[in-house]
Image: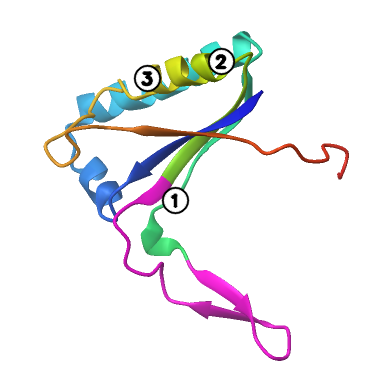
Amino acid sequence: MKFMLIMNTPYDGYDDYLNWPQKIREANIAFMVAFSRRLAAAGELVATQGLDSPHHARRVRAGADGKPITDGVFPESKEFLAGYWLIDVDSAERAYALAAEASMAPGVPSERMPEFWIEVRQLMACHEDIR
């Protein structure tokens, strides 16, 4: 069963992160790297990636001529995708346990995010031979 563990952040969460004490930022990064390495060693990690700040994101659609039209940054929103893990585990319960572990990263919860949630979404069945 494949799941996506989704980390979200407020729009200015990236700015806040840069203001964390260096020791806490380093502990946070070390935690994330070790967590991902454990998943890989267990054969449960499919992919993981952190995302750049929403300050640099653009919405894109095709214009009448098919060429891209971009629109500033994301529209106003409460939270933004900060990063994810794609995992392949035996059960939803295992995915929930891993999400709970990921939520214990150093530096969170903070005053701004007193509860740091990891969203868990099962991937829909699709054709894996499309590539």
Mark-to-mark CA distance, 1 and 3:
23 Å
Q: Secondary structure at mark 1?
A: loop
- Residue 96, given in percent of the width and then of the height, sits at 45, 20
Residue 59 lies within the magenta run: yes
Does residue 49 appear left or right of residue 45 in this picture?
left
**Front: mark 3 or 2:** 3
Residues rendered magenta in the picture: 58-81
Q: Amino acid at mark 1?
A: Asp
User: In the rendering, at what x and y percent does residue 46 appear?
Assistant: 65, 27
Nearer-N-terminus badge (1/3)? 1
Judge the density around disc 3: few (<14), some (14-19), many (≥20) Cα neighbours within 10 Å.
some
Q: Secondary structure at mark 2?
A: helix
Mark 3, secondary structure of its residue: helix
Q: Within 10 Å of the Cα at label 1, are there few (<14), some (14-19), or many (20+) other Cα atoms?
A: few
Q: Is residue 59 left or right of residue 115?
A: right
Residue 87, quarter of the rendered image: top right
x then y, percent, for residue 41: 61, 9
Of mark 1 and mark 2, the one earlier in the sequence is: 2
Residue 52 numbered mark, or none: 1
Mark 1 vs mark 2: give the one in front.
2
Asked whether the beta carbons under mark 1 and mark 3 sit within 8 Å of each other, the answer is no
Q: On residue 100, which mark appears?
A: 3
Residue drawn at 30 percent across, 20 percent down = 104
Q: CA distance from mark 1 to mark 2?
A: 23 Å
